[in-house]
Structures are given as C-alpha cells and as structure tokens.
Image: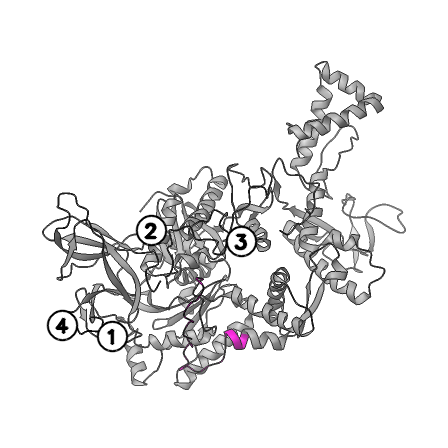
Amino acid sequence: MSGARYSIGIDLGTTHCALSYVDTSASDGERTTLAVLPIAQLTGPGAIADLDLLPSFLYLPHPDELTSGDLHLPWTGQRDFAVGEFARSRGAATPIRLVSSAKSWLCHPGVDRRAAILPNDAPPEVARVSPLESSVRYLTHLREAWDHAHPDAPFGDQDITVTIPASFDPAARELTAEAAEAAGYRRMTLLEEPQAALYSWIQKSGGQWRKQVKVGDIILVVDVGGGTTDLSLIAVVEREGNLELHRVAVGEHILLGGDNMDLALAHVVARKLAAQGTQADAWQLRALTYACRSAKETLLSDPATDTVPLVVPSRGSKLIGGSIRTELTRAELTQTILEGFFPQVDSAARPVSRTRAGLTQLGLPYAQDAGITRHLAAFLGKQVGALADLEGLRPVAAEASAHEASFLHPTAVLFNGGVFKSALLVERIMGTLNGWLAAEGAAPARLLEGADLDLAVARGAAYYGYVRRGQGVRIRGGTARAYYIAIESAMPAVPGMEPPIQALCVAPFGMEEGTEAELPAQEFGLVVGEPVHFRFFGSSVRRHDQVGTLLDFWGPDELQELEEIQATLPASGRTAGEVVPVKLHARVTEAGTLELEAVPRGTDERWKVEFDVRGSVNA
Amino acid sequence: MNDSNPSFLGRISLAVGAFFRILGDGDFAAAVLRVRDGGAPEQAATQAATQAATQAPAPSPAPTASAAPAPALKEASPDAALQLLGLLQRDARFIDFVEEDIRHFSDADIGAAARLVHEGCRATLREHFTIRPVRDEAEGSRVTLQEGFDASAIRLTGNVVGKAPFVGNISHRGWRVDEVRLPRLAEAHNAKVIAPAEVEL
C-alpha cells in the first residue's frame, strides 16, 4: 500500500495520549517489532522529560506567569501554551486556565465544537480555544515529538492510525479526522479503541491467540478509560478455513471513567473529614483526590490491606503541623467503587436516567448512572439479536434463540484501561457476567489474559496500520450503525401536532472503509444557495435496512437522533433560489469517516453534506 | 545555567561580583587581566570542562574511566543537584520536612508526614533513577572477592589484611545507579529556585 517505514498508532485519550509504532522493515508476518515513543514534554517550567504518556491537558498561562523560555520545547521556542504533564500539574492549581477532557467536548452535541469555548469556566480575559483546536494541539505535539526523535523518518510520510471511541458518532469522527489533518497528519486512518485493544492482544500473543479463541467465540471488550467507558462485541468466525474477527456491535457513548471513581472516593473522604470538623477546601480536595487514587490502587491490588492512611499535605511549608490525616477503609472502597460503579445487578437491570433539571449549566453530559455493570446489561440486552445475520455464527445464534436468551452471551472477555489492573474489579465484572450466563444455562465466559492495560490502544493502533498492509488478521465489521434522515410524511397537518416524520435509510449497517452505498431512489429539493437542514438518526440494532428503506415507526431504543446535517448547493451555474432535485449518497472514506453527498439529478456533481457541529440538537 | 552567553541581568550581577573579587583576590585579578589582554586559554579550558560536566547530569557514584593524567579533581555540577532537590521538594515535600522543627510534634504526627515524604521520595527516585544493589546476594551471606575486584563498588572493612581473594560477609549490599533520567532544563532556567513561592490570587 505504501513505502512508509513506520506504522504509527496514536491513542488520543480523554486524559492521556500515547504513541506507539511498528517498524515494518523489521517485522515479518506475526512477528512484529513494536515500540512506544517516550514523548518529550514539559514537566515543570523549563524542564523537559520523556514520558510514555502525554496527559491530554492544555494550559493557557497568563503572560506574566512564567518567564521566557519556560515553555520552550526541544524543537521550538515559540509557544505560549503548554500541553502534557506540566499543563496538568500547573492547571491543577489554576483550573480557570486549564483545558481538560477536550475529547469529551469534541463529541458533545450540545455545543459548537469549532467555537472557542474552553476552558468552560474561564474568565473573559483568557483567550479560549475550541475543542477541535485543543485536539489539534495534542496531535501536533505528538507529531513534533516524533519528528524530533526521528529526523530521518518524517511523520508526514508514515502511516498513522488515530483511535476513537467505538461509540463516536459520524460528526465526532469527522472532527477527529479534521483535527488530525490540521495537525499535519497526511496519511491517517481512524480505528475504534476496543478494536485497537484486541489488536494489541493479538500482537502480544505472537500468533498464540489462535489457541486462545475458537470459532464461535464472542469476545466482549470492556474498555474503561480515564473519562469514557466503551463496549464492543467481536465474533470469531471461520471464512475459507481461516479464523476471522468480526466486530458485531458497539455500545453507546458513556462518559464515565477512572477519574470519576477517584473523585467519588475523594468526596466520601471529604464528607468523613467534614463530620470530624475539618472542611477541605478546593485545593485540599484535589490533593485528596490524588491521595485517594493511590490508596484505591493499593486497596484494589492488595486484598490483605484493610485501611490505607491518607495524608493531605498542608499548602504552606509547615508539613507536619498543617497536614490533614485520615484514612480510606476497605468498606468505603467497596461501597463506593464496587457497589457504586460495578454493582452486582441481574441481567435485566438498566441504567437509571433522571430527567435533567430544566436549566442545567452547560457542561459535559456525564453518564447519569454510574453503574457500569448496568450499562453492560443494557448493551448486551439491546444486542441480543446481533449474531443472527453473521455467516458462520448461525448455529450459535439459533441455539441462543432456542433458549430464549434475554441478552447476547459473550464467551470471552478482554479488559482494557488502567482500572482493570485491579483483580478485584476484573473479578467483579466476570462474576456478574457469569452469574447472568449461568441464569440462562450458558457456559461461563473466559478471561483473555495478557493484555497491556495502559498502552494497548496505542500499540494496537500501530499494529493495525501494519495489518492493513496485508499482514496478519484484520477485524471486519464496517460501520456499527445504519443512518437515516427524517422526511416529513405527506399527511394533512393536524393543528397542535408536529407533522409525523419518516426515517429514510441513507447508509446501511456494516459499510466497510472505502465503500459507497448505492444511490437511493428518493429525491429532495434543495434550494440553490440556501442551507437545508435534515434531522439525522443512527441505529445500532437495525441491521437489515437497505438504502431507501423508509421507516414509519420505530422503537425508542432503535433509533437515536444525532446532530442535524446540512446541505448547501452553491449557486455556480444556477440561479439562486432555484429548487434542484438531489439524491443523498453515502460513502465511508479510507480514513474511516462517513461522508454524505448531494448528487443533483442528471449530473455527476457531488456536493458535500456537512454534519452540523454547532450544537443545534436540543441546545 | 550555562555561562556561554549570560543575559543582561546576569551580566550585571557578574560585573558586580567580579568587581569585588578583583579587589579581594589577587589571583583572580591577574586572570581577569589575562582575559582582557586577549589570551584566555586557561579560561576556555575550564569552561569546556564545566560544560561537559553539565551535559552529564549524573551525580554518578561510579564514574567511568576519565583517564586523567594528573589527579585533577572534577567539580560536581550544582545544577543537577539543585534540580534533584527541586524534584524532591515538589513531589515529596523534602525540604519542608527537613526544615521543619520536629521537636514539639508527637511521633504519630511526624510519622504521618514521613509517610508522605517517603512515598514521594520513592516515586521521585524510581522515576528519575534506576537503582539496584551492587551485590545481589542476601546481606549476611559469605562471598569471595577475586583479585582485581572493583574497589569503588566494594568497600572492605574490619580485618583488612593479606591478599585477594578475600572472603567475607556482606554487611550492606550497596546501591548502584544504572541510569539517570533527569528532566532537561531550558537555558534560562534558574535552578537555584527549588520551589517557587506560591501566591494565590
């Protein structure tokens, strides 16, 4: 496919980024040479260190805050901002100048992703940046760090894979691709994070993975990152005598991760302190969150420990006199983390969603139910019929329906994300899942061992770039949703009622990269020179709809409304105001983004239909 | 801070310092005279030596053969030491702890703070150094030292007589730094401020 020497994988995470690479000249078949690039970054004013992870934080300092040279990087002296470890630590004390969780903002349908809105709570004098721009800065830093370390192999000439949550909608995917392009990524492909985790597991096994999975296996990937939880199901099928992996379903976007757990613990401890008469201020609460994180790791990894002392240092130089002492007990940890985030529920449990108060402050739409196991139950329940169409899995699917399974039965589980370094949490999820399986008479699921929990996504992405050249096994599956636009049905208007809408399928489920959907028969009138908006929907369960399928009714869980799409027909060669009949045509680019085009009748012209990322939905 | 091209402020303080030293130090005055008159070979040599020392930031306990003909003493670079102090203060509150008067605190209070300092120091050391024992054998075990053993890595104590091979018990395994990973510093960075004062607005 290309002459690039390196295949570079980039994990653009909510809280951390990482870069891994495969040297294709030193790799052959399933034996690959894979490395992680230590990323040069500021760790203090004027201090540069190489760390495996680049914290996804952007700090916008006050002009008087630092001396000249404090923000210089080995490759540039022209910086008025900082990304990485220094941004994270400096921003902890000055949050009004800190941009964090830019990735979550990038897929927040309620805001304009191209508008300078971050930091969310910055005073007017801080020059804010857009969610898109902050992603561009992280990606640019990674490119520059690579170029600095590999002057002989320019980044722009290598094959790049950037990972995104499987749950990202088409608009968020396109924004990520746009950010990568703006950051100078010329040969870029997108890859879903749970797939990357599985690729990493395959790569690490060095060919042994074929002994650990068998045809008919359904692998559940549970990926809990710093800020998001991502679920995917990947089936092992046989085609022409070879094992093949097929991604059959992805979960919804759940803004819930390890950081929420640390914060929850800190609040538990702060309440305990308050009951003893010590009120923790904002600074101490942050220090407490930090202390809770390491206490949590101790308690979760060592079952013999029952309490971990916590010390919140004083802010001043009096360390002994001014520190707050307390402790985190196993009971509190169990109550908060295990029962709060991983409750033992049955398979019929579903996340609770509270109706939001009328005027909520504009912030990130965090998951309302912290119970990850409830989200898992909902996902498996929703995808119960996902296997029916997959060739090679019919017997599995038939058996499941014969037993009236109420949820899709995974047979193996792969974990990803630092929180699963804790055997306790792994056991809790495995125990809960196997309880559900036992209740329906199914065999327990196996744990796929040997995953690299912190760097798997970047490693898997680098390996995927290598696999794309025809080496090793690829995960198939294409898009995990079918897409629809709303059209008003031709019915007489009823006063006081919104005209009913129909959903027209424009892109079927499972479109692979580099493929095009057929042209639908339906035409729409576009007014030349004026933007026309369409309501846009996605479905992660309707696998049979073809282009042109028209839905009159659908269940509340079947279709999710996404952001509007907007088509504008330029006036070139036409008179403004003229109505031109067009068809909507969908294709999936090689990079992995969905593109919609308007094709005027009787021409070869194609006009791009844009995703409206200016926060129009329910805003 | 490298002194190849000092800033203006730096030059002011250099000038003031030099002024008094010229008055008080005859040798120094003579050296300045030599610089002013054009030839500065000695100066350039020392400067190169300091720079070399700065570039190797390791406070390395086991210096690799520098093969100096005359027993020249190398000067430890203060920057790396200051940098380490800064890291220990930032991540372990080391200076705060040592500078605090602990006489009036109970052991429990001191212990609580020590926990924090211990955890931070350990994290700092592990992040910036790879430290391993010089001898892998358990302390108390009996070892034989062959002729030509590395006297900088092993110290003989007690009844030191006779010739190698020596047989004795390990009373301390020793520590050796295999790798140093200190952050690189910007040219203008003032390493002497190991913890800036904090002013909350």
User: Quick check: do tags 2 and 4 share a chain?
Assistant: yes
**Residue A13 on image: x %, y %:** 46, 57
> Which quarter of the rendering shows the N terminus of chain B?
top right
Q: Residues within 10 Å of mark 3 (few under 14, many from 20)?
A: some
**Residue A430 on image: x %, y %:** 48, 76
Q: Disc 1 designates what residue?
A: A554
In the structure shown, which secondary structural element does the residue marked by tag 3 occupy? helix
Name which of mark 1 and mark 2 comes first in the sequence.
Answer: 2
Q: Please, what is the three-letter code of the amino acid marked with disc 1? A: Trp
Disc on res. A492: 4
In the structure shown, which secondary structural element does the residue marked by tag 2 occupy? loop
Q: Please, what is the three-letter code of the amino acid marked with disc 4? A: Pro
Q: Please, what is the three-letter code of the amino acid marked with disc 2? A: Arg
Name which of mark 2 and mark 4 comes first in the sequence.
Answer: 2
Disc on res. A469: 2
Name which of mark 4 and mark 1 comes first in the sequence.
Answer: 4
Q: Residues within 10 Å of mark 4 (few under 14, many from 20)?
A: few
User: Quick check: do tags 4 and 3 share a chain?
Assistant: yes
Q: Quadrant of residue A536?
A: bottom left
A184 left or right of B149 in image:
left
For disc 1, the chain is A
User: Quick check: do tags 1 and 2 share a chain?
Assistant: yes
Is label 2 in contact with label 4 (beta carbons under 8 Å)?
no
Q: Disc 3 designates what residue?
A: A96
The structure residue drawn at horizontal position 68% and vertical position 71%, both measured from the top left corner, is A327
Spatial CA distance of label 2 from label 4 is 56 Å
Question: Which colour assignment does the render follow?
Answer: one colour
Name which of mark 2 and mark 3 comes first in the sequence.
Answer: 3
Name which of mark 4 and mark 3 comes first in the sequence.
Answer: 3
